[in-house]
Image: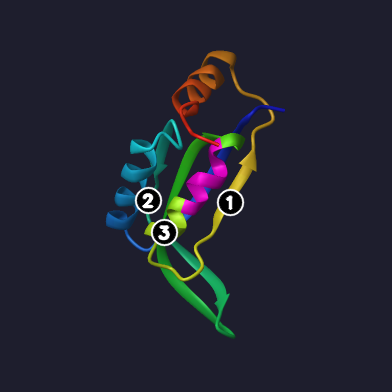
């Protein structure tokens, strides 16, 4: 299994997604991010089923940097309980993995 993970975060708007991406990349907690087109999400919240338009962001990062990335997202995000979900990567080409690890290697423990 790779050292890399994909971190998924849904944001309330493209502006919020851009702000979070900028801060995560500035701190080198991810090597890259994709801001996706808006989606319709349906979920349980406060004992009701809610529907909202959200903007998904996919970060390319490492297991080592994930906790700090999640903490920063929680600080910057407008939701009370933002989801920051790490998905393991089974395989990745070596040069790409090396690049992500190099970019995020400045993260302090």
Distance from label 2 to label 3 (Cα)?
A: 23 Å
Please state the horizontal and vertical placement of residue 109, each as a whole percent of the image.
55, 37
Residue furthest to the top:
95
Distance from label 2 to label 1 (Cα)?
A: 18 Å
Residue furthest to the front:
109
Which one is in front, 8 or 102?
102
Please state the horizontal and vertical placement of residue 88, each as a whole percent of the image.
66, 38
Residue ID at (51%, 68%): 81
Q: Do the residues labelled 2 and 3 touch (CB within 8 Å)?
A: no
Residue furthest to the left:
15
Secondary structure beneath dot 3 equals: helix
User: Would you call the spot at circle 1 few (<14 residues within 10 Å), some (14-19), or many (20 or more)?
Assistant: some
Q: Does the magenta stretch include residue 16?
A: no
Which mark's residue is nearer the viewer, 3 or 1?
3
Q: Tell me if residue 88 comes above or below residue 97 in the rendering.
A: below
Which mark's residue is nearer the viewer, 2 or 3?
3
Q: Write the start and end of the magenta stretch as one range.
A: 65-71
**Residue 85, which numbered label?**
1
Q: Earlier in the sequence, mark 3 or mark 1?
A: 3
Distance from label 3 to label 1 (Cα)?
A: 16 Å
Please state the horizontal and vertical placement of residue 17, each as a whole percent of the image.
35, 52
Q: Are marks 2 and 1 in contact (CB under 8 Å)?
A: no
């Amino acid at each position: 299994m790779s050292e890399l993970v994909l971190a998924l975060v849904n944001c309330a708007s493209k502006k919020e997604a851009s702000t979070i991406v900028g801060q995560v990349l500035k701190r080198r907690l991810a090597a890259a991010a994709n801001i996706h087109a808006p989606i319709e999400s349906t979920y349980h919240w406060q004992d009701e089923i809610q529907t909202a338009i959200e903007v998904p962001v996919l970060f390319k990062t490492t297991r080592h940097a994930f906790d700090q990335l999640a903490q920063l997202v929680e600080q910057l995000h407008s939701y009370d309980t933002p989801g920051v979900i790490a998905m393991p990567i089974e395989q990745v080409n070596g040069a790409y993995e090396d690049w992500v690890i190099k970019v995020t290697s400045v993260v302090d423990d």
